[in-house]
Image (cartoon, helix red, strand yellow):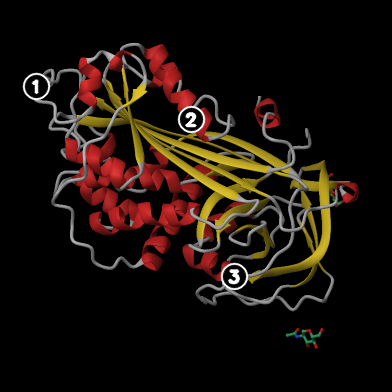
């Protein structure tokens, strides 16, 4: 299944992607909302009957009383989003076996939008502030901007794309200010769907997800997750394609043993390359790390190899935002021989559990108090997340960009031909070096040798 999906990816490139989705459902006993005096231009479409079929509707303008701009501390926002991403990854990866990949950045984006809709002084507001580690204002001004910065890069062979969409029940009325905020601040397309036609609604959402991920995630939602009470679906998609700055020579890839567990060795395809890398040791993590840059220098993969052969989970649990920042901070590259298995990962994770573990409960309760969206009683029924990652020879070595210097790391005194031999379970994290954000966080327990 995984293989067939991945094989559809454009051959030599490295495809990675993620999707996140939040369903907001009205409670069954609610009075039917009134559709009179709809302020949104989209209701012209509805009047014309266009809402019977999936289609994009024009959003309302941004609220006139937008907050006056004051400086947002971008580094502090990046630190908070990084920590949120790691917290989600720890919960999802720690609670699952085998290979897992998550990309919580899009989830942070969606939750940040819901945070804006939370009623003042509600539990939902307080819990989202605690979970996202940002107050309402820093969140709305910081997170969408951070995502924009991450996807806006000079042309190179490596690209990060992001798409966001709001699917609204055609017969349901939500507050125009919310639509305006979603569109203008959170870069969301707005589409009107008839959720009573569940098959067609699911097909429309999945078509959007598939397009946004270049076909790699063809089925974000299933028919079971959409019901007649579904009034709103928020979705975010990411697509990353990176070419190593210097690609591995396929001819040098060899079959080698990988120590899956104390009781199991597996034969894997091990890629090899000698070159100049940035690497070091984080002694408080109990891991060595090495950075493999992608073309264009803005993105790289951090490989964290636990000192304890089967200690990848312990390393992940100890990993904090400052470690990521330390690893992407400038340090001179040095000679190393890298041996790393090809791998591919496909993850389908519900994130409700992870978010509750972060203290975000009332969003999922009987009344999430999302008054900014509607005065109806709303509740989030599910948070769905799918992600994939595939790594092969089409990559290479790199330069360090300038960044903030946070030094909790000590560089290892390796000899010139240090061997970084990734022959036991490890963590692989795709980072945006500019914002220092982790984009995809994975644990590779058993490299796939089916490709
Ligand atoms: C796995 O391979 C290593 C190195 O060759 C060896 O020491 C170990 O005993 C093997 N483990 C198993 C379970 O076969
Ligand atoms: C680091 O390596 C150099 C040269 O190999 C050696 O002279 C030096 O003693 C080493 N330092 C430590 C702290 O091991």
Q: Residue at x 25, y 31 (%)?
A: 379
- Residue 209 has which mark? 2
- Residue 401 has which mark? 3
Q: CA distance from mark 2 to mark 1?
A: 32 Å
Q: Residues within 10 Å of mark 3 (few under 14, many from 20)?
A: some
Q: Residue at x 54, y 48 (%)?
A: 160
Looking at the rendered image, the quarter that the C terminus falls into is top right
Camera-nearest label, 1 or 3: 1
Q: CA distance from mark 1 to mark 3?
A: 55 Å
Q: Is residue 139 left or right of residue 3?
A: left
Residue 357 visible (yes or no): no
Instruction: Say whether disc 1 or disc 3 marks the residue closer to the N-terminus.
Output: 1
Q: Position of residue 205 (x, y in %)?
A: 42, 24
Circle 3 SS class: loop
Q: Is mark 1 within 8 Å of ligand 1?
A: no
Q: Which residue is mark 1?
A: 36
Q: Position of residue 374 (x, y in %)?
A: 16, 33
Q: Is residue 286 left or right of residue 372?
A: right
Q: CA distance from mark 2 to mark 3?
A: 33 Å
Q: Position of residue 361 (x, y in %)?
A: 29, 41
121 in relation to 195, above or below: below
Q: Residues within 10 Å of mark 2 (few under 14, many from 20)?
A: many
Instruction: Say whether disc 2 or disc 3 marks the residue closer to the N-terminus.
Output: 2
284 in relation to 15, above or below: below
Q: Nearer the viewer, residue 274 or 68?
A: 68
Q: Residues within 10 Å of mark 1 (few under 14, many from 20)?
A: few
User: Can you tell which quarter of the image residue 182 is in?
Assistant: top left
């Amino acid at each position: 299944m995984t293989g067939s999906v991945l094989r559809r990816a454009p051959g030599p490139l490295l495809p990675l992607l993620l999707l996140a989705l939040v369903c907001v459902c009205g409670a069954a006993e609610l009075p039917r909302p009134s559709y009179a005096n709809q302020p949104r231009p989209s209701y012209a479409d509805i009047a014309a009957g266009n809402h019977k079929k999936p289609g994009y509707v024009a959003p309302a303008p941004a609220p006139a009383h937008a907050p006056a701009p004051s400086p947002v501390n971008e580094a502090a926002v990046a630190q908070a989003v990084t920590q949120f991403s790691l917290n989600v990854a720890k919960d999802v990866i720690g609670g699952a076996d085998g290979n897992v990949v998550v990309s919580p950045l899009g989830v942070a984006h969606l939750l940040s939008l819901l945070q804006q809709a939370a009623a003042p002084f509600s539990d939902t507001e307080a819990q989202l502030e605690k979970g996202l580690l940002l107050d309402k204002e820093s969140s709305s001004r910081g997170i969408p901007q951070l995502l924009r910065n991450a996807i806006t890069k000079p042309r190179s062979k490596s690209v990060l794309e992001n798409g966001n969409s709001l699917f609204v029940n055609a017969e349901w009325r939500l507050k125009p200010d919310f639509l305006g905020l979603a569109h203008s601040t959170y870069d969301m397309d707005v589409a009107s769907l008839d959720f009573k036609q569940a098959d067609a609604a699911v097909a429309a959402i999945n078509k959007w997800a598939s397009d946004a991920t270049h076909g790699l995630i063809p089925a974000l939602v299933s028919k079971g997750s959409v019901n007649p009470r579904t009034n709103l679906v928020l979705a975010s998609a990411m697509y990353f394609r990176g070419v190593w700055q210097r690609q591995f020579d396929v001819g040098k890839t060899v079959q080698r043993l990988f120590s899956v567990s104390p009781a199991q060795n597996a034969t894997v395809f091990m890629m090899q390359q000698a070159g100049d890398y940035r690497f070091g040791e984080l002694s408080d993590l109990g891991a060595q790390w090495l950075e493999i840059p992608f073309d264009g220098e803005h993105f790289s993969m951090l490989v964290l190899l636990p000192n304890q052969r089967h200690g990848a989970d312990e390393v992940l649990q100890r990993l904090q935002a400052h470690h990521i920042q330390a690893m992407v901070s400038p340090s001179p590259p040095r000679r190393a021989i890298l041996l790393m298995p090809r791998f591919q990962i496909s993850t389908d994770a519900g994130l409700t559990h992870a978010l509750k573990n972060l203290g975000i409960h009332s969003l999922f309760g009987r009344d999430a108090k999302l008054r900014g969206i509607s005065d109806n009683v709303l509740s989030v029924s599910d948070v769905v997340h799918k992600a994939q990652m595939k790594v092969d020879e089409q990559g290479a070595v790199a330069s360090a960009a300038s960044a903030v210097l946070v030094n909790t790391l000590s560089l290892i005194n390796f000899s010139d031909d240090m061997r970084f031999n990734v022959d036991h379970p490890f963590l692989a994290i795709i980072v945006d070096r500019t914002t220092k954000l982790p984009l995809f966080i994975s644990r590779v327990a058993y490299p796939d040798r089916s490709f």
